[in-house]
Amino acid sequence: MILQWTTDVPLDKNTPACQNVVKFGCRDNLMATGGDDCLVHVWEISESKDNNVSDEKQKGKKEQKWTVNRLYKLAGHSKEIRDLDFDPSGTFLASASKDQGCRIWDIKTGKLAQLLPADTASGLTYRRCKFSSSTELITLQIPNGGRGSSNIVVWKANKDGIGGVWS
């Protein structure tokens, strides 16, 4: 499947257009992107009502066309986004950034649910994030320079669920 669309994301010399990561949610209609603009974009994808082929040779045939609309532009990171992952329920989205932060976003509200602290004293930054379940998030922290010891950290949600305190 190839999706092409236009957005209102500003593309000028101060806003890089590079999107580093694209993830699809467990719900078929959600997609998230993150990149050098330090923003996480959450998109809703739906099948277009007009699926008629415009090519005269293919007249009468149907093709699959999609409409992509932005639900949220999530701001909070100060450096480029490196990784994204939806939790299995499709309720939350984790974003890992070069700014040494990993954030958990509530997809229903578009609000930040929690900021997971990095081990900044050791100069580590988040590189990857992956939900293994709705109550467990695995992160990879690497040194800023890329050399040295890395950490794999498993964050578990408390009894209140993923939006609660992680430890």
Image (tube, rainbow, N blue to C red):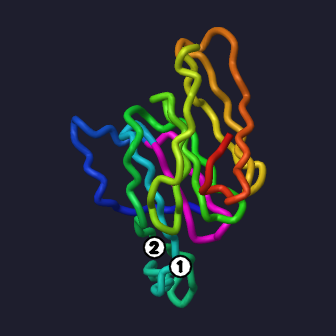
Q: Residue at x 53, y 48 (%)?
A: 114
Residue 21, visible in the rendered structure = no
Q: Residue at x 63, y 26 (%)?
A: 141
Q: Residue furthest top?
A: 148
- Point out residue 9 in the picture as x, y percentages from the top left corner: 30, 53
Which of the pair 167/126 is nearer the observer? 167
Q: Residue at x 62, y 54 (%)?
A: 164
Position of residue 132 relative to residue 57, above or below, is: above
Give the CA separation, mark 1 to mark 2. 6 Å
The amino acid beneath tag 1 is Glu
Is 30 colored magenta in this rendering? yes
Residue 99 in which image quadrant: top left
- Point out residue 84 in the picture as x, y percentages from the top left corner: 58, 46
Position of residue 82 relative to residue 143, above or below, is: below
Q: Which residue is mark 1?
A: 47
Q: Which residue is mark 2?
A: 67
Q: Residue furthest right?
A: 132
Position of residue 68 relative to residue 136, above or below, is: below
Q: Residues within 10 Å of mark 1 (few under 14, many from 20)?
A: few
Quarter of the image where the N terminus is located: bottom right
Quarter of the image where the C terminus is located: top right
Q: Earlier in the sequence, mark 1 or mark 2?
A: 1
Q: Mark 1 touching mark 2, by CB under 8 A? A: yes
Q: Residues within 10 Å of mark 2 (few under 14, many from 20)?
A: some
- Helix, strand or loop for disc 1: strand
Q: Which range is magenta?
A: 19-34
Q: Judge from the rendering whether residue 74 lies leftward or rightward of residue 147; answer left or right.
A: left
- Point out residue 147 in the picture as x, y percentages from the top left corner: 62, 9
- Helix, strand or loop for disc 2: strand
Residue 111, visible in the rendered structure = yes
Is 23 colored magenta in this rendering? yes
